[in-house]
Image: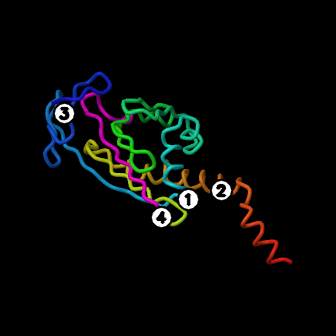
């Protein structure tokens, strides 16, 4: 069974790819995978919503993006350097996307990005699994850290600072002073 993404018929996940070798219209190619994670100072739902919202994604990364909250919806990021399609969406918990950069050749199938969001105290542990990355394109692991995780942490930290303190915090601070 094939899937069609971006007008190209590609092997379905789990089909056409064995270990690190895949076959498709362009013949065989080697791929690799990696995982990165970090703690983001926001709730899982806030991270999920920002990832899939055009305006928030653009602000969060500091670069133009388009996004969609729909399975099958297309997205772009970093002024078109990244593009893809939402494959699976579980609100506040999981995002799976077909993903490619402008560095992929026309023969390279889309890679897969699986984002898992787990509550971690007053924050979120974001784990990103990037699979089917074409061999030789090794900069993405650091790219996720530098171009996503670092600006996301700053974005959400800035949102927390901009929020007024809760009334409970105000009462506690007044009691401490008085």
Q: Earlier in the sequence, mark 4 or mark 1?
A: 1
Q: Earlier in the sequence, mark 2 or mark 1?
A: 1
Q: Earlier in the sequence, mark 4 or mark 3?
A: 3
**Label annotation for residue 11:** 3
Q: Residue 53, how many percent across, how many down?
A: 53, 37
Mark 4 to mark 1: distance in Å?
9 Å
Q: Residues within 10 Å of mark 1 (few under 14, many from 20)?
A: many
Mark 2 to mark 3: distance in Å?
43 Å
Mark 4 to mark 3: distance in Å?
36 Å
116 inside magenta stretch = yes
Q: Say what secondary structure mark 4 lies in.
A: strand
Residue stretch in magenta: 100-119
Q: Residue 127, how many percent across, how many down?
A: 39, 56
Q: Residue at x 48, y 33 (%)?
A: 67
Q: Which residue is mark 4?
A: 120
Which of the two discs, 3 and 1, sits closer to the camera?
A: 1
- Figure quadrant of the C terminus: bottom right
Mark 4 to mark 2: distance in Å?
16 Å
53 inside magenta stretch = no
Are discs 2 and 1 less than 8 Å apart at CB? Answer: yes
Q: Residue at x 15, y 30 (%)?
A: 1
Q: Residue 156, how many percent across, how many down?
A: 59, 53
Q: Say what secondary structure mark 3 lies in.
A: strand
Q: Which residue is mark 2?
A: 160
Q: Earlier in the sequence, mark 2 or mark 3?
A: 3
Q: Residues within 10 Å of mark 3 (few under 14, many from 20)?
A: some
Mark 3 to mark 1: distance in Å?
37 Å
Q: Residues within 10 Å of mark 2 (few under 14, many from 20)?
A: few
Q: Is 166 positioned to the left or the right of 59 in the image?
A: right
**Label annotation for residue 93:** none
**Label annotation for residue 41:** 1
């Amino acid at each position: 069974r094939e899937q069609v993404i971006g007008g190209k018929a590609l092997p379905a996940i789990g089909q056409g790819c064995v270990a690190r070798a895949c076959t498709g219209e362009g013949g065989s190619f080697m791929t690799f995978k990696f995982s990165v994670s970090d703690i983001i100072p926001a709730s899982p739902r806030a991270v999920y919503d920002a990832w899939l919202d055009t305006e928030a994604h653009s602000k969060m990364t500091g670069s133009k993006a388009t996004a969609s909250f729909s399975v099958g919806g297309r997205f772009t990021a970093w002024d078109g350097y990244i593009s893809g399609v939402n494959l699976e969406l579980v609100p506040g918990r999981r995002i799976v996307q077909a993903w490619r950069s402008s560095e992929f050749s026309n023969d390279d199938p889309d890679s897969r990005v699986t984002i898992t969001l787990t509550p971690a105290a007053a924050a979120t542990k974001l784990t990103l699994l990037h699979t089917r990355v074409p061999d030789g394109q090794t900069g993405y692991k650091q790219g996720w850290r530098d171009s996503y995780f670092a600006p996301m942490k700053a974005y959400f930290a800035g949102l927390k600072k901009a929020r007024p303190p809760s009334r409970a915090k105000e009462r506690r601070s007044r009691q401490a002073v008085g």
